[in-house]
């Protein structure tokens, strides 16, 4: 079974972009290349998005891998699966991680 998963890196220092891709490789076991663009709302940082079909729990694994880096702002969403609600994880350096579930997407 697979579910839709989307990682939105809202801002990250450019030097961390390959490390984010390597972290995703460690979780997904396949090479990941993201398209990075300048983040005008936070000069000197980049943003990017990566969407894929993954196993349930992939969004939690990504959040666990990236959540303590301290210099990233990101969101990961995961679609619902049987017995599991759709989930969104949001993380910022100052506020930490927030999780919410959406039962209406079942």
Image (cartoon, helix red, strand yellow):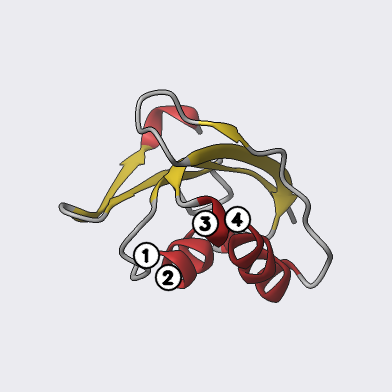
Residue 72: x %, y % from top left: 39, 54
Residue carrying label 3:
59
Residue carrying label 4:
17
Q: CA distance from mark 2 to mark 1?
A: 5 Å
Residue carrying label 1:
67
Residue 103: x %, y % from top left: 38, 36
Residue 32: x %, y % from top left: 78, 57
Q: Quadrant of residue 54?
A: bottom right
Q: Nearer the viewer, residue 23 or 45?
A: 45
Dot 2 lies on which element?
helix
Above or below: residue 3 compared with residue 70: above
Q: Foreground mark, 4 or 1? A: 4
**Mark earlier in primary sequence (3, 1):** 3
Q: Is residue 27 left or right of residue 99?
A: right
Q: Is residue 68 left or right of residue 63?
A: left
Quadrant location of the N terminus?
Answer: bottom right
**Mark earlier in primary sequence (2, 3):** 3
Residue carrying label 2:
64
- Seen from this angle, which residue lies furthest top? 40
Q: CA distance from mark 4 to mark 2?
A: 17 Å
Disc 2 to disc 1: CB gap under 8 Å: yes
């Amino acid at each position: 079974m697979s579910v839709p998963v989307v990682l939105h890196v809202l801002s990250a220092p450019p030097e961390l972009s390959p490390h984010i891709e390597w972290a995703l490789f460690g979780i997904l076991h396949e090479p990941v290349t993201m398209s990075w663009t300048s983040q005008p709302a936070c000069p000197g940082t980049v943003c990017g998005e990566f969407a894929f079909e993954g196993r349930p729990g992939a969004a939690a694994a990504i959040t666990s891998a990236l959540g303590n880096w301290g210099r990233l702002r990101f969101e990961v969403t995961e679609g619902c699966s049987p017995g599991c609600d759709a989930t969104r994880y949001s993380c910022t350096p100052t506020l930490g991680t927030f999780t919410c579930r959406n039962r209406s997407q079942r």
